[in-house]
Image: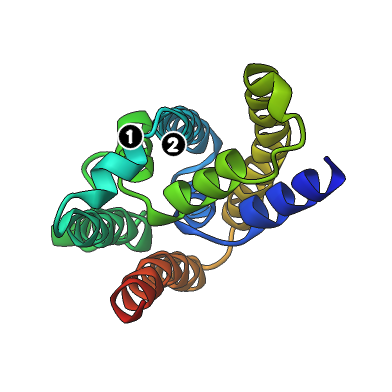
């Protein structure tokens, strides 16, 4: 059980599209927008976890080319979110964000987020510490997962909001937003690279 808790913590705390995007939304758009985004990430992660438990992940990823398509969609959608974060508050009219990334954006992101599937697959298909009580074990895993998931994601949101509250010069804030956006896309590029080489 302790090994499961430790592994879950390491899996969730490692930077991925979810935590980087929540920090970016917090930095670019503030706490209220970040909170809405966080709830979308949580529901998306819950749905991915259920898909793993009920075997839908195996069915989805066994379809020819579908993993590559999902990775491509993930990269495209993260690039779209990254663009909004990178240019949040920009005075250049043609790149001004018309709509703040919100609940639905986060939900879509988790549905196509490679890390969400990998983390949930590891959590729910390994560490069978109570196999004779499968349903209870799955409920315990969900409780442990969420007990770790919320503080980690609120922490990343708080970090992003703190950067925003520092009232840094616009050029510095824009540079931070662009760096966060670049890291978001880089995480997915690395996922695509490892997928194609594996």
State the residue at coordinates (79%, 51%).
6
Q: Crowding near pointer 2: few (<14 within 10 Å), some, many (20+)?
A: many
Label 2 sits on a secondary structure element that is helix
Q: Nearer the viewer, residue 18 or 36?
A: 18
Q: Crowding near pointer 1: few (<14 within 10 Å), some, many (20+)?
A: some
State the residue at coordinates (63%, 28%).
142
- For the N terminus, the quadrant is top right
In the image, is 1 to the left or to the right of 35?
right
In the image, is 22 to the left or to the right of 75?
right
Residue hosting label 2: 52
Q: Is residue 45 visible?
A: yes
Label 1 sits on a secondary structure element that is helix
Vertical side of 40 occupied by 125: above or below: below
State the residue at coordinates (76%, 45%).
4
Image coordinates of residue 79 in percent, x first then y, are 27, 62
The answer to which image quadrant residue 198 occupies is bottom left
Extreme residue toward the front, this view: 132
Image coordinates of residue 16 in percent, x first then y, are 50, 59
Extreme residue toward the bottom, this view: 197
Tell me the CA gap for discs 1 and 2: 6 Å
Image coordinates of residue 135 in percent, x first then y, are 62, 18
Residue hosting label 1: 56
Vertical side of 32 occupied by 163: above or below: below
Extreme residue toward the right, this view: 2
């Amino acid at each position: 059980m302790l090994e499961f808790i430790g592994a879950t913590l390491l899996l969730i705390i490692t930077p991925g599209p979810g935590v980087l995007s929540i920090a970016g939304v917090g930095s670019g758009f503030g706490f209220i927008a970040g909170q809405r985004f966080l709830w979308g990430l949580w529901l998306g992660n819950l749905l991915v976890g259920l898909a793993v438990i009920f075997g839908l992940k195996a069915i989805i990823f066994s379809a020819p080319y579908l993993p590559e398509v999902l990775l491509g969609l993930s990269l495209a959608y993260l690039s779209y979110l990254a663009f909004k974060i990178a240019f949040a508050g920009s005075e250049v009219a043609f790149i001004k964000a018309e709509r703040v990334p919100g609940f639905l954006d986060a939900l879509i992101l988790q549905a196509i987020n490679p890390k969400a599937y990998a983390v949930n697959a590891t959590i729910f298909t390994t560490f069978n510490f109570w196999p004779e009580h499968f349903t209870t074990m799955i409920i315990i895993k969900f409780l442990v997962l969420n007990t770790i998931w919320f503080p980690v994601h609120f922490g990343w949101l708080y970090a992003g909001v703190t950067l925003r509250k520092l009232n840094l010069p616009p050029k510095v804030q824009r540079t931070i937003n662009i760096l966060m956006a670049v890291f978001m896309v880089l995480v997915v590029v690395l996922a695509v690279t490892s997928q194609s080489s594996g």
